[in-house]
Structure formats: C-alpha cells, structure tokens
Image (tube, rainbow, N blue to C red):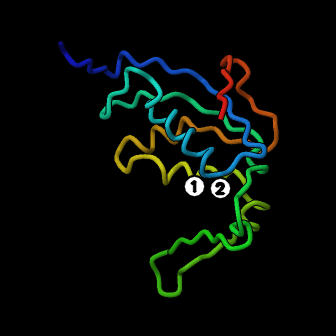
Amino acid sequence: MKSYISKASDVTRDWYLVDAEGKTLGRLCTEIATVLRGKHKPTFTPHIDGGDYVVVINAEKVVLTGKKTSQKVYRHHSGYFGGLKEVSFKDMLQKNPEEIVRHAVYGMLSKNRLRDPMMKRLKIYVGSEHKHEAQQLKQLDI
C-alpha cells in the first residue's frame, strides 16, 4: 500500500460562502482556517497549498463570549520606543470589522511560506453584499 502525495498541479479549488452573523469569532475562524489550509479534503498534503477560497459576509455581526467585547485589545508595536499601539475590540468593530476576522484567521494558520497565499484566498465583506456570484459559491455550514 502506498501513501498518496498530491502535487500542486492536482489541486482543484472551490469557493465557499460563510455568513458570520451571530457566530462566535473563534469557532468561526477555526473552520475558515481549516478550509483555507485544505484539511477538509481527503487529498490533504502538508507541504502543498491545496485549500479553497472562502468568502465571509456580515463580518460586523460576529460575536464574542463573556466580557471579551469590553476587555479584548489588539496590540502591535512599531519597533520604536513608545511605539505600542492598542485598539480595543469595540473600536476595531466600528472602524475595521473585517480586520477582526482576518486577524483571527491569520493567527490560526501555519506560520510558514504557505500562509500568505492562503490569506489571499480569504475574502471578507461588511454587510451581505459581495462580488463573487460568478464563482457559484457553496454554502459552508458552521
């Protein structure tokens, strides 16, 4: 018996639609990361980028549990002294709600050279409108 190793030329990509309305952020993003990585396919190979496209709508309606809506803070540092920037979840939800989902999925993907091509296949939209009707999206139930 031989192990099946897929090649980059064998990869076929599907398009999935995810509605984030009322979904918990972490549970939603783990499923999205699984589809972007390609782990839901029987032909999964760790060193091949075999994942699918994911379109997320209603990114502003994602929810957090507990007190995280008031306590969660996104931090990044510029590298200079005093360069720590902090943005609360409430402010991020008003300014860039799509960045909340993007940040969570980015942290869940494997930290190697396959992560950037996977993130390019993630399309996030505020509201229920998107521009990918031509791709015949399949509904991803989460």
Amino acid type, label 2: Ile
Residue 75: give x, y in percent of width and height. Answer: 57, 72
In the rendered image, which residue does mark 2 sit on? Answer: 100
Q: Amino acid at mark 1?
A: His
- For the N terminus, the image quarter is top left
Q: Is residue 132 above or below residue 91?
A: above
Q: Are marks 1 and 2 in contact (CB under 8 Å)?
A: yes
Q: Is residue 119 left or right of residue 3?
A: right
* Residue 83 spot, x, y in % from top left: 53, 81
Q: Position of residue 142 (x, y in %)?
A: 65, 35
Total residue callouts = 2
Residue in the image at 81% along x and 36% along y: 128
| Secondary structure under the numbered disc 1 in the rendered image | helix
Task: Residue 46: name its quadrant.
Answer: top left
Say what secondary structure mark 2 lies in: helix
CA gap between label 1 and label 2 equals 5 Å
Q: Which residue in the protein does label 1 denote? A: 103
In the depicted structure, whether residue 129 falls above or below residue 138: below
Residue displayed at 68% across by 16% down: 136
**Quarter of the view holding residue 89:** bottom right
Quarter of the image where one finds residue 131: top right
Look at the picture and state if 14 lies above or below 112.
Answer: above
The extreme front residue here reads: 66
Residue 105 at x, y percent in the picture = 54, 48
